[in-house]
Image (cartoon, grey):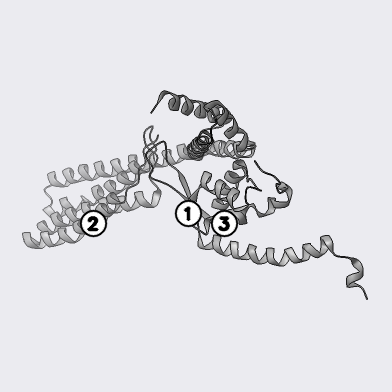
Amino acid sequence: MMSATISTDLIRGHTDTIILNILRQGDSYGYEIYKRILQLSGNRYELKEATLYTAFRRLEKDGDIVSYWGDETQGGRRKYYRITGQGRKHYERNVKDWDFAKNILETLIKGGIEDVQG
Amino acid sequence: MSRDEKELDQKIKAYFDNLFSGVGASQQLFELKEELTINMKEKIADYRARGMNDEQAFREAVISMGDLNGLVDDMRKLGQDTARMSIYSSMDNRISAGFIVVGVLLALFGIFVMAMTYYMREEGVAVAGNGIFMVAGGMLFTYGLLTRETARKYAMNKVRAALYGLSIGSILFGMFSAVVTHFSVGETYVSIASLMVFFLGGVGLFLLLALTESDRRKQ
């Protein structure tokens, strides 16, 4: 199904930001968030549900998201998540950090020492 | 619901029950299971729509969940906290029992003293004045009763219970002041006026609380 996938190690520190990015675009529930992440990555990254639910619990405890039950009657209720004001701020900050870090990482990984000397 | 559907529901339930077996019950565990179940059902439905049979779809869904052990550990810790909380709540129950006992005794004391002063042929005001013990007793009794955890219901939170106590106290105080005013002034309209203020306040507060009540029943 997936041709090339991203290594889990590379993405681990960004799980929360990825979830906040989905939620800042609208309330959603577990399986839908899972699908959106898969979609957004063009089927190249699957965030395991185990990771997802652990992250929900952490984010909710920190006050970045809140949860509420939907009122579906057919086949059980869905638990929806909504981003809070604090969550949005947290997201913005993470985006800034990422913009800052990705350029430095690029040079750290590919840059030649000679280019900066002399 | 078809037979296949029911069978699948049972299979999912059995899977999560087994995964979280031995984990102490808690509200969070109950909700997490419900959340995981509905999401897994939707995933299986998607897999089936892609042409998998029930058995395959279920197996794939379980695999794609990933390693749930971290969640199981989280829930286990919560379950232990709940066990610890039940000790606290039994402590709270003793406090609430104390309020109920003191409340009832105060009210009874009021009744006895009233009877005593009545037969001592005191004035009406002096007899009725002892009703203040019943007002205080009623407040404490209400608070104690509501903060009590029973087999069917969780205890009400303390602030809310105190407000209920206040509303009952206010209603009782209204009646009390009406009787006292009646005996001291001898004019019925004055006594209605003094009843009105506290009675209305108490009823207003009571209705406000009753209408914003949340369900304390245990599952």
SS assignment at label 1 = loop
Which label sits on residue A27? Answer: 1
Residue at 23% in and 57% down: B204
Chain containing the residue with disc 2: B
Q: Nearer the viewer, residue B111 or A59?
A: A59
Q: Where residue B104 sits: x, y (%)?
A: 29, 41
Which label sits on residue A20? Answer: 3
For label 3, the crowd category at 10 Å Cα-Cα, with few meaning under 14, some 14 to 19 and many 20 or more, is: many
The amino acid sitting under disc 3 is Leu
For label 2, the crowd category at 10 Å Cα-Cα, with few meaning under 14, some 14 to 19 and many 20 or more, is: some
Which label sits on residue B204? Answer: 2
Q: Can you tell which quarter of the image residue B141 is in?
A: top left
Foreground mark, 2 or 3, reads 3
The amino acid sitting under disc 2 is Gly
Does any portion of residue B123 appear in the rendered image? no
SS assignment at label 2 = helix
Residue at 40% in and 26% down: B2
In 3D space, how far apart are the residues under numbered discs 1 and 2 (Cα atoms)? Answer: 37 Å
Q: Nearer the viewer, residue A6 or B192?
A: A6
Residue at 57% in and 38% down: B75
SS assignment at label 3 = helix
**Disc 1 + disc 2, Cβ < 8 Å:** no
Residue at 92% in and 69% down: A114
Say whether disc 1 or disc 3 marks the residue closer to the N-terminus: 3
Chain containing the residue with disc 1: A
- Mark 1 and mark 3, same subunit? yes
Question: Is A7 left or right of A72, judged from the image as shown?
Answer: right
Q: Where residue B184 sits: x, y (%)?
A: 11, 60
In 3D space, how far apart are the residues under numbered discs 1 and 3 (Cα atoms)? Answer: 10 Å
Image quadrant in which the C terminus of chain B is located:
top left
